[in-house]
Amino acid sequence: MIIETVTAQAVSLRISREELGPRDTITPREARAAVAHALESSGKRPWKRMEISLFPAERELLLIARPVEVQVYRFRFRHFSHLLAASAYIDPNVPCDVLFAEDVFQLIVHRSEAGLPNALYEFGELCPCTPELAAHLKEQGVVIAENALPVLRRYFG
């Protein structure tokens, strides 16, 4: 295995046909292990989640990997009643925090594989967010509820 590139944003590796043996490709587990090894050998921590692309060629297999960051959504609401109305449509298993920061109520949705309900866009304003910004807002604002959906439904539902 030849390590071509290792950065915080990408890893590229070349694996020769001799290393592959009779196989044309490698398993997902082998690919994750190769990326983790490349990251560790360059002094970086392995990624928790990654997207891997494999490109077979005549003499080698090219592996390109990128980290997959946790998707964080942030919605701003001018009125608490709007936040309550919109949150009623979110699956209760989706982790969310409610806080008051920047003079508005904010709903931080930590991840959602199922997509987000239209009510969030109708009642609130989608704003850019990263995990770091979400942590900063929680630190600087007033946290109303962590894992907020069960709390909101119990007291306001």
Image (cartoon, helix red, strand yellow):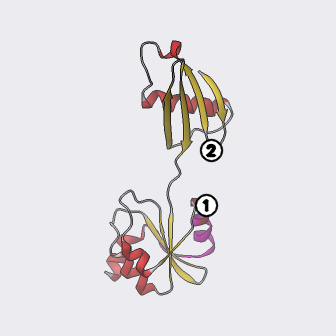
Residue drawn at 62 percent across, 44 percent down = 9
Image quadrant holding the C terminus, namely bottom left
Is 139 a magenta residue? yes
Image coordinates of residue 30 in percent, x first then y, are 47, 27
Q: Where on the picture, by quarter, is residue 27?
A: top left
Sequence order check, earlier mark of 1 and 2? 2
* Range drawn in magenta: 134-147
* SS type, badge 1: helix
Q: Amino acid at mark 2?
A: Gln
Image coordinates of residue 99 in percent, x first then y, are 52, 76
Residue 132's disc is: 1
* SS type, badge 2: loop
Q: Amino acid at mark 1?
A: Glu
Residue 36's disc is: none
Tell me how far mark 1 sits from mark 2, CA to CA: 17 Å
Image quadrant holding the N terminus, namely top right
Q: Are marks 1 and 2 in contact (CB under 8 Å)?
A: no
The residue at which mark 2 appears reads as 9
Image coordinates of residue 85 in percent, x first then y, are 36, 81
Count of marks placed on residues: 2
